[in-house]
Amino acid sequence: MKSDQIKKGPDRAPARSYLRATGLDDQQIAQPMIAVVNTWSDVTPCNMHLRELAEPLKEGIRAAGGTPVEFGSIVVTDGISMGTEGMKCSLMSREVVADSIELATRGHCLDGVVVLVGCDKTIPAAAMALARLDLPGMAIYGGSIMPGKHKGIPITIKDVFQAVGAHAAGTMDEAELREIEAEACPGAGACGGQFTANTMALALTTLGLSPMGVNDIPAVHPDKAKAMTACGKRVVEQIREGQSARRMISVESLRNAATVTSATAGSTNAVLHLLAIAREAGVAFDIDEFDEISRRTPIIGDLKPAGRFMAPDMFEAGGTPLVIDRLRKAGLVSDTPTVTGRSLFEECANPLEKPGQKVIVDFDRPLESRGGFGILYGNIAPEGCVAKLAGHGDFIFSGPARVFENEEDAFAAVQGRKIASGDVIVIRNEGPKGGPGMREMLAVTAALAGQGLDDSVALMTDGRFSGASFGFVIGHISPEAANGGPIALLRDGDTITIDVDRRVIETDADLESRRAGWQPRPHAYASGALAKYAYMVSSASEGAVTSFPDLNDRRADHG
């Protein structure tokens, strides 16, 4: 066992002395030592219940003959930081969480690792850390929040953001805005739609890094604690079997994860996160995979933000096993290993489908003929960008550019009713490096929706979008403005054409004639974590990562 390095032999007496101080006896020290990484926080409903879920998990580890070693990591909550400077920290927190898991697990020579996750960046961070460490282990999602209700209608946090737009448009008074604010989030759990948290929880199950069905269970459901105990027992079995995380991560399992994401009209953030997980596992996986998969995968999940239902509804309908079984029968996914020791198809055989459910439809009558992503190229995005397709019917848009240097200016223009039907809003300097941090534009897209402009306005950015965003939105434009990408050269009035079927995003403006006059903007942060992130981070087309297999080559490039 790896932990023998810290606990075996006379030389390790000081380490054993420390372990005894924590309450461990000889038997507990001799057993496999398993990291229980807890991203608990009381600042967010997404993670506030993870402290309680850790207890049955640790009980399961002990019952199976292992010794749990619990430590914490951080969470940055998108729903709180959205539209503020704080949102610059969200994507970076993915890297910090992955780094902290790696450091504490390696630093104590632990034998396995289980990560409890909630708000959305903690989920891919757990997978990235598992891939780096390549130990026995798993990621366990704390589960979805239950829906709120307003006037008898189920609502989510997305409805609060849209209510802000409706209030600005004068179609909702402040009293109703406050009612929706108070009603949308009734308790523990992550955002209830097929937003980034539930999208990535589904993706990790499909990758094989989370036990089948566990992530589906809502946060406050009575079955959640029982599932934690079973997970604790299983991770000890993984150690005895010699099963490690990288066995689960392959081109095939990544394609499976992209397929379920596309089939449920999930968050475009999955593109960033799956690319990052692939990079950490040393698996060649290209951004174009998402376009190919989306073109052949119809949408069968009627889930918010584009659909009608929420994650707890999908759980009741049949959950992940039902989705994957549908995809298996259509020949769209492959059989791959999972942390349970059984294959993906074995885990999803004979799913329990709720009679009459309408959440997951049949392939003979899909909600949309193609999936939720499009990867576009052109003289605006030579390295590619990501179009979110679910929720609107048009795949072609052309109009004049309305250029904004940051999210705040764009939001102010929308709230000030200065955006007209047919405009293409351009928000730049919000990429991984330029932001820094690649903020989500939910405040802007929700305000457009609240004003009824989501179907008549396009929005493009070198930033990204929340899983709750919908409309004709294109993000991850690469190269970003901070790196001198063509988006930095656009001007008000330039005609921009977006054609999803042709995979094109372009302008008729002569951008290169403007390059000589372009100057990079000064970095917003001269020191601290965000400055380090801006220096190190890769392009969004590569997953916006800070961990590189070719680190020596990058050092040479930086001199």
Image: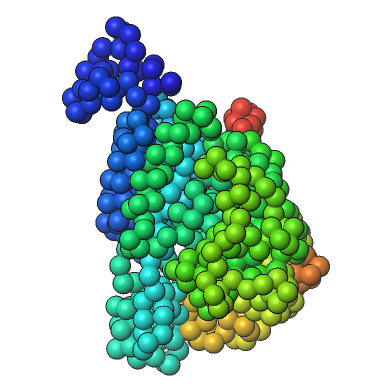
Res 468 visible: no
Q: Between residues 340 and 149, which one lies in front from this camera angle? A: 340
Residue 41: where, in percent of width, then height?
Answer: 29, 53
Residue at the spot x=43%, y=37% of the render?
Answer: 235
Report the residue at 39% width, 39% height from top.
Answer: 233
Residue 331 in view: yes
Quarter of the picture holding the C terminus: top right
**For residue 79, which quarter of the picture?**
bottom left
Front residue of this view, candidates 331 and 431? 331
* Quarter of the figure with the N terminus: top left
Which residue occupies the extreme top position in the image? 10
Q: Residue at x 28, y 50 (%)?
A: 51
Task: Count up the numbered dots.
Answer: 0
Q: In this orientation, which residue lies closer to the viewer: 531 or 103?
A: 103
- Horizontal side of 216 relative to 282 (left or right) equals left
Whether residue 307 sits left or right of residue 70 in the image: it is right
> Which picture quadrant has residue 190?
bottom left
Q: Is residue 488 above or below residue 473?
A: above
Q: Residue furthest right?
A: 502
Above/below status of 432 relative to 284: below
Residue 503 is situated, as x and y percent measured from the top left of the image, at 77, 65
Percent x, y for residue 14?
25, 14
User: How are the residues colored?
Assistant: rainbow
Q: Residue 477's spot in the image, x, y percent?
A: 65, 59
In which quarter of the view is residue 7 placed?
top left
Above/below status of 198 relative to 529: below
Going by the image, does 112 lie left or right of 289? left
